[in-house]
Amino acid sequence: MTTWQHPQSFPELGRHQVHVWRANLDLSSTEIIKLTTLLSDDEINRANQFRFSEHKRRFIAARGILRQLLSAYLEVNPGSLDFSYENKGKPCLASQTKLQFNISHSQEYALFGFTYEHQIGVDIEYQRSVPDALKIAQRFFSPREFRMLAETEPERQAELFFQFWTAKEAYLKALGIGLSGSLSEIEIALDCEHCPYLLAVRGKPATALDWSLYPCSPVTDYLGAIAISKRIAPRQLAFWHWLPDSNAISL
């Protein structure tokens, strides 16, 4: 299981470190109002396009928390941050900075990943029943991954499916191409402790050697993954828990 720390003050991100934050997006109305004041007009317009209020509130929470975290790392006002978007919609900071980040959310939880200079992608998924897991895997996974899933006992198939899925999506998000990339071209394997790792990309194991891939357990019934375009040792990752109005965020 992942150990999520509750920092007493905002943690310093070293040049060769990776920070991953988790946050519960189901916040009080007071906290949502506070976070809304940090958003740009564009973000508010995007929030207003959601049909259901819970989706709107979670979007506001995710973007507001992202602004808080970025502002703490960069020591700037959260409302002053300007985002630009890559071709496939991956957000990045419009200003020149070596700080790289990524965000993912599913249901009421979000993951935020931060590192310097190298590409980073994170993904979080709520574990649920997937009746068509084998059909989806046969279409979008590699033949070897499909066989692994088909040979797994039925009660573990959903967990393995999401292990593969989060790992693949984290890698694609790091590249900024998301699910427009080919899931089947990214091969994931499991080590002796049943943790996923990047085996090959487009059949080339050498490409995988330049990447680090780590799973995480954000909370019960959720799975997550982090992909970084650099070899990172486990001791270089730190997992933090975000709380509203805590002393962990000193702006």
Image (cartoon, rainbow, N blue to C red):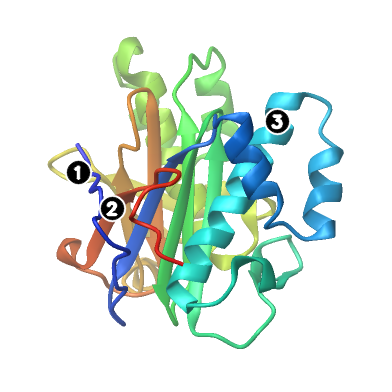
Q: Is residue 12 left or right of residue 39?
A: left
- As displayed, is residue 11 above or below residue 94? above
Q: Amino acid at mark 3?
A: His
Query: Image quarter for residue 193?
Result: top left
Give the labeled residue for mark 2: 239
Residue corresponding to mark 3: 55
- Residue at the location (46% across, 54% down)? 112
Q: CA distance from mark 3 to mark 2?
A: 25 Å
**Is residue 206 rendered to the left or right of residue 184?**
left
| Secondary element at image label 1 | loop
Q: Secondary structure at mark 3?
A: helix
Q: Residue at x 69, y 53 (%)?
A: 180
Furthest toward the bottom, the residue is 96
Q: Amino acid at mark 2?
A: Phe
Between the C-alphas of marks 1 and 2, the distance is 7 Å
**Relative image position of residue 22 (x, y in whole percent):** 40, 45
Left or right placement of residue 190 versus residue 223 in this view:
left
Q: Mark 1–mark 2 contact, CB under 8 Å?
A: yes
Crowding near the residue tagged with mark 3, few <14, some 14–19, many ≥20 C-alpha atoms within 10 Å: some
The residue type indicated by label 1 comes to Thr
Above or below for 240 versus 114: above
Direction from residue 229 to residue 71 in the image, left or right: right
Q: Which mark is residue 3?
A: 1
Query: Which residue is more in the foreground, 206 or 165?
Result: 165
How far apart are labels 3 and 1 at the CA level? Answer: 28 Å
